[in-house]
Image (tube, coloured by chain):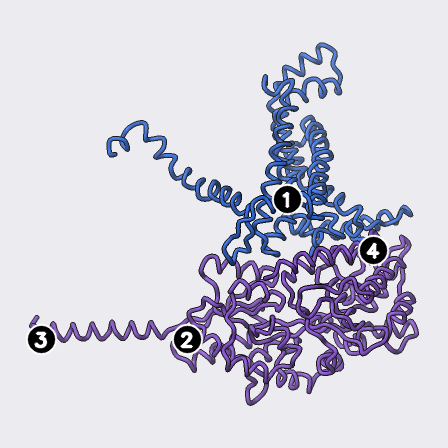
Amino acid sequence: MTRGMIRVLGACSGTALLAGALSAQEARTIQVATHYTQEQAAPLLACFEAYEAEHPGITIEHQQTAYGDFLQTILTSRVGGTAPDIYNVYSVWVPQLASAGVLEPPPAGVADFITQNYSPATVGAATIGGQLWGIPTELSIYALVYNRKLLEQAGYGEPPRTWAELREIAQKITTTNDQGNIDVGGYAYGTSVAEGVHPFYAQMFAEGVAPFAEDGRSTNLTSPEAVKVLSEQAALFADGITSNAITVDNFASGAVAMQISANWNKFGWQEAFGDQFADTVGVAPIPHDGGEGGTMLYSFLWAVDATSDAKEESWDLLSYLNTPRADGLSCTGEMLAGMGAFSGNTADLERMTAGGDAFDKAYVEEVTSGRAVTQPNIWQAAEADRILRGYIDQAWAGSLSAEEALASADAEIQAILDEQP
Amino acid sequence: MRAFLSSKKAAPWLFLSPVILFALVFFVLPVVFAAYVSLTTWDSLTPPRWVGLRNYEYLLTRDPVFLRTLWQTLYFAIGTLAIGVPLALVLAYAFSRSRHQGLWRVLYTVPMVTNIVAIGFIFWFVFRQTDGLLNRVLGLFGLPGPGWLTDPGLAMTSAILVFVWMELGRNMLLFAAGLGSIDESYYEAAKLDGAGHWQLFRFVTLPLLRPTLLFVVITGFISGMSYFTLMLVLFPGTQGGPSRAALTTGQYMYQMAFEDLRMGRASAVSYILFALVSVVTLIQLRVMRRGGVDAH
């Protein structure tokens, strides 16, 4: 081999190595963690492919984790140094994640995009102490859901507006079997923490009082309104209108007349009631005594990991996924519409409800009217909710009065709120 | 060094080294680390902060749930032993003297090989208040239908009954093996002395079965003290049954660690539970060794 030939080969090898190194620098893999199944996330996955085609060198991987394991998975991946670049997180987890430095605040351009394109309530769900932490996505709103047919059979053409009316209607509808157990419940709660605590918060908002102070450092659980709400709930148990055995899950089988539930249940009820859905399931504002009324909403949000080595690319991808397209919904909006959920993006929400049914419109009315208030993003929210649920259970069971239960819950939760920096 | 490695002294350590390394990494290290973590406050995201014995002080003096879960866990562990062990012993003894033993063994090992989630579903349908199988049967006799899984006063008892059913096969298998190892000559000698069925069981079977009994009671107690999988499937979505009536210390510890991110406090719970199990196990060993096991 001549010396010239060696030089040529050497130059070629050097060029190839340099090119390889450069392309390796440009190549980025963005890992996106959500609790949505592959089937639910199908529109999103299609958008990932489209984004990859438009941005050579970018590869996007979807990591699906069950909702119940999501927070633990984030923790484990952080400890192991394999954290995803993008998370879809529940808004109440944000205070801890932000405090621990897990989340990266959005850049100014993305923050402007959020404040200009999302309603104040949804922006509030992604904001802690004035700092925005991500792009709001799925909105869950609470309202009174009722079985029109059961109410009509009992002689009521309209849903209740006050708690006294609700109690009267529920009493009339409730039937029991030979053993004294409820066959058809006038009203129902659920067994999970959220199914007890969220309706309680929603009722507090309906009575005009937020469950927590605006700065998240104290509770309003011992307020007269909170005691009134829990006393009224406990009275439904004491009078045999509801019980632990008849739960919100029984609504789909026609064994429950009324309950406070979130909109994301729609598809399950559509499957259960089929073509009778519209004639059976009604939605109304939460019954309350006086005032404007109100309810609670909570949101998920897209957030970026603070240790990601592709932060800029991640925010760019999120902007792409959440910007409504010329011909319709944003990628995120399309996925949420497919699940029967609402998007926090104002333009998406308008498009979703333009062709929506009475069910959708009743829920969205809670947002557009301003009645729906964001679930407070307090410190250790999940723990506080669990403590509260424990005491709500004891009030329902009659082992504590509403005042005692809420005073105990307040003391324990206040101790947790005092821990925050 | 080479001389040492090729010596007879080094050989056992070389052969044992993979196991020792495994035990160090997966047992000793976590145990020591948990002891350290129990003296800190740690959310696994930020560095641990030293708090000394404050986690223990909080759990033992101020936590309104922890002591309650300890009592509930003890109730569960002792309840399952009090019902499950005598039942398994009597059934194993009866089956050991019956025909078709192969068939019985197949039947009583069925709960052992049944998936816990399937067991949860089966008993959920049995125990449902309004339309469950058990209450339907009670209804046929005009009896009331209690809330087996929804009444705080009954929830843990229901869990105990299901756990007894789950563990029955395992305990019967152990007792059957123990019974099989008792020499028939003891029974023959006792019969010649005029012993009846009860006397054979009381004065021959029971004393000679004490090692098996000790094993069943100790392992049953330890598993009962740390168990909560059944509660997760029997009371899905709840915090340990209605009004936390079936919340065990193990499940409470899990909630603390992985839902509330209170790793320090959860580690302290694990150490308190460890201490409690150790003390009770030592008492069991001391009591049950009296009068036979040591000699046996």
Q: Which residue is mark 1?
A: B57
> Closer to the observer: label 1 or label 3?
1
Query: Element type at marker 4?
Result: loop
Q: Is residue A223 left or right of residue A121?
A: right
Residue at mark 4: chain: B
* Disc 3 to disc 2, C-alpha distance: 39 Å
Q: Are marks 1 and 2 on the same chain?
A: no
Picture coordinates of residue B74 (x, y %)? 70, 38
Identify residue type, mark 2.
Answer: Ile
Q: Residues within 10 Å of mark 4 (few under 14, many from 20)?
A: many
- The amino acid sitting under disc 4 is Thr
Total labels: the figure holds: 4
Say which chain tag 3 marks. A
Colour blue maps to chain: B
Circle 4 or circle 1, nearest the eye? 1
Mark 2 sits on what residue? A58
**Quadrant of the rendered structure where residue B105 is?**
top right
Residue designated by label 4: B130
